[in-house]
Image: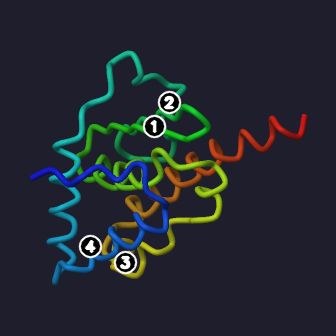
Amino acid sequence: MTEPAISSTSLATRREALLARLGGFRHSQERLQWLVEQARQRPALAAGLKTEAHRVPGCLASLWLVAEMRGGRCHFQCDSDSQIVRAIAGLLCDYYSDAAPVEILAQPPDFLEQVGINQHLTANRRNVLSRVWERIRAFAEKPKELEQD
């Protein structure tokens, strides 16, 4: 079963929905299984986008993150050769896609600790979350840099 799209809603609303969904699982393994199932349903990135320019460094698995601006809103796609990495990165991409840069910068993903996402991940997978957030945040900061010029 595919979850409903979260675009067109505020990050605060998405945050509450995600916390409710993830908080509904009794065990961390159930949460992780749900995330992996969501990753399996996500379309793969086109081969032409799996370039070094889109590769996220510092991950043991290959991970690509593509960011683009459409109508003043940020959109993110990702792919990985690891389902778990794809799931973790996809969680952040789905959460932040179709949000305004200022909203992204005001909502770091620290709320994921509330439902135990971080505490049951290996150090490398926590690193993936951190690196994906760094990329998303850096992309959201770009419009601010351009306005100052």
The residue where tag 4 is placed is 22
The CA span between labels 4 and 1 is 23 Å
Bin the neighbour count of mark 1 within 10 Å (Cα to Cα): few under 14, some 14-19, many 20 and up. Answer: many
* Left or right position of 134 against 142: left
For disc 3, the marked residue is 119
| Mark toward the viewer: 4 or 1 | 4
Going from N to C along the chain, the mark reached first, 4 or 3, is 4
* Foreground disc of the pair 4, 2: 4
Q: CA distance from mark 2 to mark 3?
A: 27 Å
As drawn, 99 above or below 145: below
Q: Which element carries disc 4, helix, strand or loop?
A: helix
Q: Is residue 80 left or right of residue 95?
A: left
Amino acid found under the numbered disc labelled 3: Gln
Front tag of 4 and 3: 4
Question: Which sits earlier in the primary sequence, circle 2 or circle 3?
Answer: 2
Q: Which residue is mark 1?
A: 65
Separation of marks 4 and 2 at Cα, in angstroms: 29 Å
Instruction: Point out the tag, 3 or 1, that comes first from the N-terminus.
Output: 1
Q: Is residue 30 left or right of residue 19?
A: left
Q: Are marks 1 and 2 in contact (CB under 8 Å)?
A: yes
Which labelled disc corresponds to residue 54?
Answer: 2
Q: Please tell me which of labels 4 and 2 falls first in the chain.
A: 4
